[in-house]
């Protein structure tokens, strides 16, 4: 079999959706037939965090937890370069390629949000991205992205040839909804009361746009003004965490907005199942995995018309401009036509499975392997 090294040294606790994207591809690769033997190179502790992946693959852990970017970059240019030099393909999943090492590479680039919103990125990281991403795009054998939106951005912003880029959709594992915390337990655990809820599962980074929902809760009419409605922000603390908490206090929403932080998979599934809608007002998404998680869970989706979200949601959810009146009408509409949105969303979610994501990935490996054979 053709040997592939998957570089996941950037997969440290807290990276969120980008880690899920690659881990779910690994799950999908175990479900389909292909000719690749894949070894996973990951930070120390990865095996304990992902025991199901460790059952299916050889995990080669680095001599570091890679919690600092400097540690990870050093290991990629030394330890990883040596350990992967004899592999047919090295798949770098973290958006950059080290300048030293195997040249037969697939680069996964999740998004380039920093182009449109540089103000939301720390200066040191922004400088690193501006230096490494264009260089990595040039040096990669092929580039995998989660959506056509990101592919188009790379061609427009960096002149990357479209034929060098392949879309590898995000996909959910077959067991995704197998475990869900019961509604009564969640209402007690998170003090949700007896009224309706809407859920926004996203880290509190500025581009996620939590402020838009808070203004709707404070000023919106219709269903958003219902004092029994609870808005659940289920996500890790990001760069806008304190700003979001301050806004909740200033607007007097402390009894209507719940912030449990990042929740377990079972709690996430339970919250989605009981919610009137998943609400997703993000200013930028390279894909937006929570919207397909909601579709699979039988939850209507209301999202912004930004980034890749219209591409992913299609016509099975309410894709709205960031206008208060549109979002008021959208919440009322998904309640009235709930059965339609549930059925249509579930059907569309079947286009986003881990097995299909893995098939997309294999297509990219095949293209690199074919090119290597031609050269040899």
Image (tube, rainbow, N blue to C red):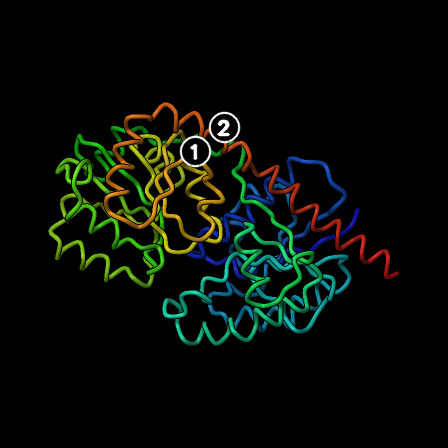
Residue 3, percent from left and from top: 75, 52
Is 233 placed above or below 191 here? Answer: below
Q: How many marks?
A: 2
Is 337 placed above or below 106 here? Answer: above
Q: For the residue labelled by badge 2, is the local secondary structure a helix, a strand or a loop?
A: helix
Choose top left, top right, bottom left or bottom right for residue 86: bottom right
Q: Nearer the viewer, residue 64 or 313?
A: 313
Q: Image check: 185 left or right of 110?
A: left
Q: Identify the residue at image location x=61%, y=37%.
A: 355
Q: Residue furthest top?
A: 339
Q: Nearer the viewer, residue 167 or 204?
A: 167
Residue 95, percent from left and from top: 56, 62
Q: Image check: 275 left or right of 65?
A: left
Q: Identify the residue at image location x=45%, y=62%.
A: 113
Q: Which mark is residue 316?
A: 1
- In 3D space, how far apart are the residues under numbered discs 1 and 2 (Cα atoms)? 9 Å
Is 3 placed above or below 24 here? Answer: below
Q: Identify the residue at image location x=21%, y=50%.
A: 214
| Tags 1 and 2 touching, CB below 8 Å | yes
Using a 10 Å C-alpha cutoff, classify the residue at mark 2 as few (fewer than 14 neighbours), some (14 to 19) or many (20 or more).
some
Residue 59, percent from left and from top: 62, 52
Q: Nearer the viewer, residue 168 or 225?
A: 225
Q: Which residue is mark 2?
A: 347
Choose top left, top right, bottom left or bottom right for residue 171: top right
Q: Nearer the viewer, residue 192 or 46?
A: 192
Residue 180, percent from left and from top: 38, 31
Image quarter of the C terminus: bottom right
Using a 10 Å C-alpha cutoff, classify the residue at mark 1 as few (fewer than 14 neighbours), some (14 to 19) or many (20 or more).
many
Q: Which mark is residue 106?
A: none
**Mark toward the start of the polypeptide (1 vs 2):** 1
């Amino acid at each position: 079999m053709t040997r592939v090294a998957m570089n996941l040294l950037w997969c440290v606790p807290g990276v969120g959706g980008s880690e899920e994207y690659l881990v779910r591809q690994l799950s999908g690769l175990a479900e389909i037939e292909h000719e690749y033997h894949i070894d996973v190179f990951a930070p120390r502790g990865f095996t304990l965090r992902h025991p199901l992946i460790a059952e299916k693959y050889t995990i080669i852990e680095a001599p570091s937890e890679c919690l600092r970017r400097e540690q990870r970059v050093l290991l990629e240019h030394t330890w990883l370069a040596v350990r992967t030099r004899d592999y047919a393909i090295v798949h770098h999943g973290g958006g950059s390629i080290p300048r030293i090492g195997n040249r037969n590479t697939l680069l996964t680039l999740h998004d380039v949000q920093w182009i449109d919103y540089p103000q939301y990125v720390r200066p040191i990281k922004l400088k690193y991205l501006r230096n490494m991403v264009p260089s990595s795009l040039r040096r990669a054998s092929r580039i995998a992205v989660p959506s056509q939106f990101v592919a188009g951005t790379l061609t427009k912003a960096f002149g990357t040839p479209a034929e060098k880029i392949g879309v590898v959709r995000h996909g959910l594992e077959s067991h995704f909804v197998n475990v869900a915390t019961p509604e009564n337990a969640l209402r007690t655990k998170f003090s949700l009361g007896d009224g309706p809820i809407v859920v926004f599962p996203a880290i509190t980074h500025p581009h996620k746009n939590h402020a838009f929902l808070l203004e709707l809760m404070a000023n919106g009419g219709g269903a958003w003004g219902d004092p029994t409605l609870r808005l659940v922000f289920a996500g890790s603390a990001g760069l806008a965490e304190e700003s979001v908490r301050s806004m909740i206090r200033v607007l007097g929403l402390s009894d209507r907005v719940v912030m449990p932080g990042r929740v377990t998979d079972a709690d996430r599934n339970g919250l989605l199942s009981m919610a009137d809608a998943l609400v997703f007002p993000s200013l930028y998404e390279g894909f937006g995995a929570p919207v397909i998680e909601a579709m699979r869970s039988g939850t209507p989706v209301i999202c912004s018309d930004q980034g890749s979200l219209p591409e992913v949601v299609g016509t099975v959810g309410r894709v709205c401009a960031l206008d208060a009146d549109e979002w008021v009408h959208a919440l009322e509409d998904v309640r009235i036509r709930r059965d339609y949105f549930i059925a249509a969303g579930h059907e569309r979610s079947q286009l986003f499975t881990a097995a299909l994501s893995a098939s997309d990935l294999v297509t990219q490996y095949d293209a690199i392997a074919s090119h290597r054979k031609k050269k040899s």
